[in-house]
Amino acid sequence: MYSLVHTVAHIKQKKRELKTVGSEVIIDATVTNTPVFVRTSAASNGVLGGSLVLNNIKLNNVPTAVGVVGGAVVLAGGTTTISSWGQGNVYTGTNSVGRFTQGSIPAPNKPASLLDSSGKIFGKSHPQYGAYAVSQFVSVRDQGAKGDGTTDDTAALKAIFAAFAGCKIIFFDAGTYVVTSTLTIPAGTQIVGEAWSVIAGRGAAFQNMNSPQVVVQVGAPGSSGVVEISDIMFSTIGPAGGAIVVEWNVKQTTQGGAGMWDSHIRLGGTAGTNLQGSNCPSSGSGGTTNCLAAYMALHLTASSTAYLEGTWVWLADHELDQGGQGQITIYSGRGILSESAGPVWMIGTASEHHVLYQYSLVGAQNHYMGLIQTETPYFQPVPAAPAPFSINTSLKDPSSFPGSEAWALSVASSSNIMVFGAGLYSFFSNYGQSCLPSESCQSELLNIDSSSTINIYGLSTVGTTFQLSINKAGVINQSSNPNGFAATVTSWSRT
C-alpha cells in the first residue's frame, strides 16, 4: 500500500538488457496535486517493455495518470479512481497466447475480511510499544532463560509464558534460546526480540522425519486472541529432519490481531546450527542424515488467521559465519503450507530453497500475497524432489514435481487468492548455470489446479521455461514475455 503525494514514479523502458524496473505493481495509492503519477522513459509501442499494474488508485488533481517522457499520455488522469489498469501482457485461463494491453485488466474479487473500512487492503505496522512503560515489559533472561545457544531453555520459556502471557510484553534479550520439545506461545502473547533473538529447536524430538514434531506452536490448536511477534528468528540445530519449525494455529479476534513482523525462519548456515559449510559442503559429501535442517518451515493451519509482514523463510544456500561464505547443501522438506480459511495477509514474504515447495496453498481461502519471492534449491534435480524426503499425503503434498524440482507456488482447492507482485527464480541446475541463457533451469514452477480461484499480477520469473501451469501442464512460456532481468506476466486470471 502506498500514499503518494507530489511524487512521480519512473519506469525505464529501453532495451531489455538496460531496463532498471521491469515490473511495478501499485495498489491502494492516493496521489494528490502532481502533474504525472507514473512516467515511463520510452513508449511501449505495442509490446511489453516494462510491466505496470495499477489497482484502486485515487487521483486528486493529477492530469496524467500514466505518461511517457516527452509528453505523450498513455492514461489520462484528473480527479478519478483507477479500478484495475495494466500495461503489459495479459493472460486468461489456459490460453497460451497473451494480449498486450494498455487498459483495463480483470479485477480480483477482494474479500471483505482482507480490507479495511476504506476498502483498501488492511495493513498493520510493526508494533513499537512506545507508549508502554518499562514496567510493562519482562525480560526472559531476568526470568531465568539463558539464551546462550547451549542451555536447554524449554522449561524456563514455558514458565515465562505461563506467568506473563497476556499481562506483560515479553522481551527476548539477544541470544539463542534452545528448546528440546514443543514450545507453545499462547494466544494473548506479545513478544519482541533484540536484533533477531533466536528460538532454536534441538535434539531427538526433532530428528525423525517419519514422526515430525513442532518446534514452536503459535497458539494451541483452536485458540483465538491477540498474538504479536516482532524481531524474532526461528531456527533449528541439526540434524533436525523431523522439525516443523513454526505451526501457526491462533485465530484473530480483531483484524490483524494475530501477526508477525520482521521475524524470520532461518535454517542453517550460521554458527551453532551444525549445518554449515564445514560439515555440509555444496559437494554433498556431508550426506543427508546430518544435513537435514527441517521437515517443514511454516504451517498455517485450517482454523488460523495470520498477518505476516517482512517474513523470510530461508534454508541457507550459503555460509554466513565461516570464511568465504561458500555454498552449502542442506535440506528442508517444505517451505510455507497454508490451509487457512483466512484472512491471511502475506506482505513482503519470501520462501527459498525448500525441497518440495516454497509456498503451497491447499484448501486455502481469502489470502492477500503482496510481493512474494522464491528460489528453487540450487542442488536440484540432484537429488530429485522429493528426496531426501517422502510425499506426505496427510500434509497434502504435491504428488509430482516439475523436472524433479520444487514448486515455487502450488495452489490447490483454494479460493479468493490474490497475488500482487511475485518474483519466482530458478538460478541453478545442480549448481550449474549453463541453463540460464535459455531460461531452462526448470520446466515449470507455478501450478494452479482447475478448481482454484486466484488472480496474479506482476508475475516475474527467471530460469523456468513455463511461468504458469494449470493442472501441471505448462501454459505460459517465458519466451513470450521478455522484460529485462526477468520474464513478466502482467496479469493472469481464470477468465
Image (tube, rainbow, N blue to C red):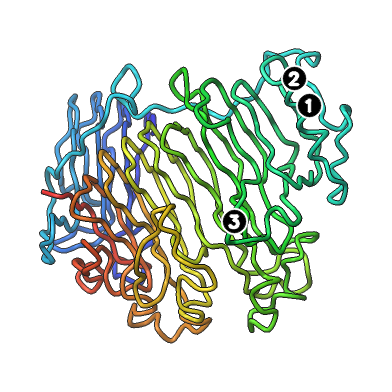
Q: Quadrant of residue 83?
A: top left
Q: Is residue 211 above or below residue 406?
A: above
Which residue is at a point 57% across and 58% down the rendered structure image? 295
At which x and y percent is residue 131? 67, 13
Mark 3 or mark 1, which is nearer to you? 3
For disc 2, the marked residue is 164
Disc 3 + disc 1, Cβ < 8 Å: no
Callout 1: SS: helix
Q: Is residue 374 above or below residue 378?
A: above
For disc 3, the marked residue is 211
Which residue is at a point 73% across and 69% down the rendered structure image? 276
How many badges with numbers are in the image? Answer: 3
* Amino acid bearing label 1: Ile
* Amino acid bearing label 3: Ser
At which x and y percent is residue 398? 36, 61
Comparing 7 with 125, the one in front is: 125
Q: Is residue 224 above or below residue 39?
A: above
Comparing 64 with 406, the one in front is: 406
**175 displayed left or right of 78:** right
Comparing 186 with 205, the one in front is: 205
Disc 1 + disc 2, Cβ < 8 Å: yes
At which x and y percent is residue 157? 78, 33
